[in-house]
Image (cartoon, grey):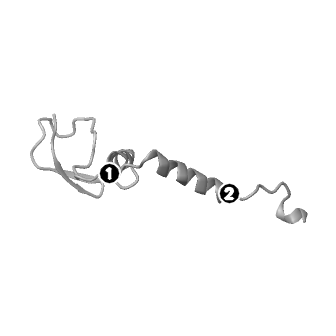
């Protein structure tokens, strides 16, 4: 069964009555009905990856070169050891 409603704090107000008796224990699965996935969620990341602009492999190679060029050497001594 699928019902829709509105979240109000800890409560969800459904648009129609449930076919259960008052006090009966039920299991609930909740998800947002927004068109857009929540920012940073796996759904949002997958949607962004599938959306244009799609990168050329040369652009990815250039990005990796820039990242490697900007890396700083690792220091083997700590700040307090100097």
Q: Residue at x 37, y 49 (%)?
A: 54
Q: Residues within 10 Å of mark 2 (few under 14, many from 20)?
A: few
Answer whether labels 1 and 2 touch (C-beta < 8 Å).
Answer: no
Location of residue 28 in the rendering, given as x and y in whole percent from the top left corner: 27, 39
Q: Please tell me how many numbered marks the rendered image carries.
A: 2
Separation of residues labelled 1 and 2 (CA atoms): 29 Å
Quadrant of the image occupied by residue 25 = top left
- Residue 51 or 25: which is nearer the viewer? 51
Q: Is residue 43 above or below residue 75?
A: above
Location of residue 29 in the rendering, given as x and y in whole percent from the top left corner: 28, 39
Q: Is residue 26 above or below residue 4?
A: above
Say what secondary structure mark 1 lies in: loop
Q: Viewed as shown, does residue 27 lie left or right of 78?
A: left
- Location of the C terminus by quadrant is bottom right
- Residue 12 or 46: which is nearer the viewer? 46
Say what secondary structure mark 2 lies in: loop
Q: Residue at x 54, y 53 (%)?
A: 62
- Location of the N terminus by quadrant is top left
Q: Which mark is residue 70?
A: none
- Residue 33 or 11: which is nearer the viewer? 33
Task: Read off the residue under disc 2.
Answer: 71
Q: Residue at x 17, y 50 (%)?
A: 5
Q: Residues within 10 Å of mark 1 (few under 14, many from 20)?
A: few
Task: Read off the residue under disc 1.
Answer: 52
Location of residue 20 in the rendering, given as x and y in whole percent from the top left corner: 15, 35
Q: Viewed as shown, does residue 13 lie left or right of 67?
A: left
Q: Viewed as shown, does residue 75 lie left or right of 72?
A: right
Of mark 1 and mark 2, the one earlier in the sequence is 1
């Amino acid at each position: 069964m699928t019902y829709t409603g509105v979240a109000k704090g800890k409560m969800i107000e459904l648009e129609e009555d449930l076919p259960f008796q008052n006090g009966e224990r039920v299991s609930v699965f909740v998800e947002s009905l927004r068109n857009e996935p929540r920012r940073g969620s796996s759904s949002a990341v997958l949607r962004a990856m599938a959306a244009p602009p799609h990168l050329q492999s040369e652009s990815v190679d250039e990005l990796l070169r820039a990242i490697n060029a900007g890396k700083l050497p690792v220091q083997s001594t700590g700040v307090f050891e100097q």
